[in-house]
Amino acid sequence: MDAPEALLGEYVQWLTVEKGRSRATIEAYQRDILAFVTWWGERPLATVTSAHLEEYLNLLRDARAASSVARALSSLRGWWGFLVDEGHVMLDPCTYVAPSRRGRTLPKPLPEETLIGLLDTMPRATPVDRRDRALLELLYGTGARVSEVVGLEIQDLDFDEEVIRLTGKGDKQRLVPMGRSLVAALREYLAPGGRSEFPHPRAHAHVFVNTRGGPLSRQGIDLIIDARALTANIDRSTISAHVFRHSCATHMLAHGADIRFVQELLGHASIATTQAYTAVSIASMQSVYTNAHPRAHD
């Protein structure tokens, strides 16, 4: 049997050519499958059993949200179905694995003062500083998905109208507004002394670049957030690109934004997805009410 990495390469090609899956979907499948392959190690894939998969999924359940575990199982089901169909393995170990229960987990935004304090105290002395500030301002200012930020190009920025074109799931595009802080951070980053100081600034059209001059990756964004959180004395386990998205939505709803505007801003196909953020806002209001109203407690 071929090495797992080679089999995964075949699967990716099949998903791309035969199924026409989007790049973001394929990358998600790859991450889930590679995580399992790394855990499995050098043992032959043909010896994987349902019990082994349950063991692996139980480890994930201890560290991830239920929705993330469910997606990992879905990725593995698809891969093993492909391996069986192509004759690489005889049995599908996913057959007898029970689907993960997808509990309703509320997003955990950071407090406003924490995020605003982080953004307001970020240095601006170097090109890297200016890039990182623009990146974090964009994540919080627009609630963009990390995949949308990775794919963002210069032509997607309209400073005259102060809007950004984001390309989301299913290649659906939407326009989102830029606030004053984001406009200022992006202008400073794109001005001389910012993006132009990275190697090969005209080699591609991506807005955010790494120190080698190539497009900034999802992993690169994670590392930037980790480093900036460490400097600001923020617990790194509480902050990520997705937390910026959660925080953007929750803070806007807390300040009275209409839920349908937030749905459009985040690119949610269903308003039911956006309503999870409403629950967070209600929980926050309940806490304030309980502490402040004289008739809210004995």
Image (spheres, rainbow, N blue to C red):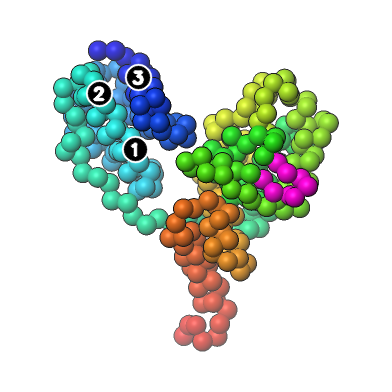
Instruction: Verify whether residue 159 appears in magenta.
Output: yes
Image coordinates for residue 240, horizontal then vertical, percent: 54, 43
Residue 62 position (above or below residue 205): below
Pointer 2 residue: 83
Task: Name the residue located 61 percent from the left edge and 61 percent from the top edge.
Answer: 252
Pointer 1 residue: 72
Task: Name the residue located 72 percent from the left edge and 32 percent from the top edge.
Answer: 128
Q: Are marks 1 and 2 in contact (CB under 8 Å)?
A: no
Q: Which amino acid, by three-letter code, is at mark 1?
A: Ala
Image coordinates for residue 39, horizontal then vertical, percent: 33, 27
In the image, 77 versus 297, the foreground residue is: 77
First reached walking from the N terminus: tag 3 or tag 2? 3
Cα separation, mark 1 vs mark 2, equals 17 Å
Image coordinates for residue 83, horizontal then vertical, percent: 25, 23
Secondary element under disc 1, as helix, strand or loop, is: helix
Task: Name the residue located 32 percent from the left edge and 51 percent from the top edge.
Answer: 102
Residue 190 in sight from this viewpoint: yes
Left or right: residue 283 compared with residue 126: left
What mark, if any, has residue 10 been given in the picture?
3
Q: Which amino acid, by three-letter code, is at mark 2?
A: Leu
Cα separation, mark 3 vs mark 1, equals 19 Å
Span of residues in magenta: 157-164
Instruction: Verify whether residue 260 appears in magenta.
Output: no
Rendering quarter of residue 92:
top left
Q: Which amino acid, by three-letter code, is at mark 3?
A: Glu
